Amino acid sequence: MCTLKIEANYGSGFLGNPENGPPRGMAQQIRNDEADISISSSEMFPERQQYLTFLIPTYESRLYAFVRKQSNNALRNIFLKPFDNKIWTALLLMLALLGMSLVFLTWVRRSWSDETHENDEDISEEAFLWAMGTLCQQGWHISPSSTSMRMIILAGQITGVVCYIAFGAALVSILSADETLFASSDDLARYGYTIYSDRGTYRSTYVHKSIENRPANEVLPEDKTIPVKKAFTQLDKPNSAFLGLQDTVYPIIKAMMLDTSNIREYEIDDKICSKYSHVPVNWAPVQCGMFIKKNSPLQPFLNQKIILMMETGLRRRYFGYYYRLSVVHCSQSQSSVDSMEFRDVWTSFLLLAIGCIPSFLLFGYERLRFCVGNELLQQ
């Protein structure tokens, strides 16, 4: 028969950064036999498990990236966004290659053969305009006569069809999706976001270094690992993201917004939902739990108690109540789809203006030159 005596002791602090050697604080007390178990929620890391034995996790949560939503009046560059810069560069090189190929083949035929085609000559004079029209799936009033020229035009048209389909699908996706959402954590670095991580959640620093392709043993700058209170002000900066846990970030944001504004408490969730957005950045959950001394014989007994608590539903009940108080609950109105506005298609009008304005200027110049020429002839 086993008789246990329960005696509570005060902990001497948290375990510290797992990258800085043996854990300190409460872990040191456990290792010194000042207590048998630390009833805390400490993050599980392989570095810590070298010195301690963790029990079955009693807390799990995914890591999220918190960003501020863009203003509804923000202009969206939907023309350039569907393709990466490398694809746009490849299309420009394809345009140049098509134009130079048309000019080169016409020159070769003119130099090595007496036979020339009027259509080919006309096409070579406007080679780059023809190449642009081919990639944009635009037809012309004439067609090339030689087989070599036709092959070049056909290659350009096939390339244009593939790019046109991909471009159209990407446009539909952009116009129907929320601008603040990310498909993966790589999008944070792709769109040039400045990333901050929660100083109290060490898993966020690991993910932070992974997103920015930093070495695992590199120490992040002090201004990149910040407390949640400071994240409230950092998120107001453009293109800023904060890595943390919902149940630690949102309660502090709620308290700070209530202190700095005249919002009523029942309105605070909708206000946060309209201002901020959170997106999961890792699939492996952050696991936390209690710990005991390395290879302690109490491990099976204590794990059994945790399992019994799970089976009776107490853990689920208490965690459900905890999360209802900790996270925000957005109303249905926050998920409504906005109609398309000028901000969504302004680049299309910009391209139209780029084509029309120079055309009108050239027309005015030619008209002025024609009038001046007539006056000189009359004199």
Image (cartoon, rainbow, N blue to C red):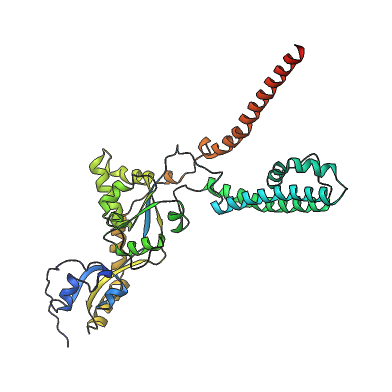
Q: Would you place residue 287 above or below residue 300 in this image?
A: above
Q: Position of residue 352 (x, y in %)?
A: 61, 34
Could you tell me which residue is drawn at 66 percent across and 51 percent down? 94
Quarter of the C terminus within the rendering: top right
Q: Position of residue 41 (x, y in %)?
A: 25, 67
Front residue of 24/265: it is: 24
Front residue of 301/106: it is: 106
| Observer able to see residue 207 | yes
Could you tell me which residue is drawn at 29 percent across and 74 percent down? 47
Could you tell me which residue is drawn at 26 percent across and 55 percent down? 227
User: As drawn, is 87 to the left or to the right of 74?
Assistant: right
| Observer able to see residue 84 | no
User: As drawn, is 173 to the left or to the right of 269?
Assistant: right
Quarter of the view holding residue 12 = bottom left
Q: Position of residue 39 (x, y in %)?
A: 20, 70
Q: Position of residue 340 (x, y in %)?
A: 53, 39
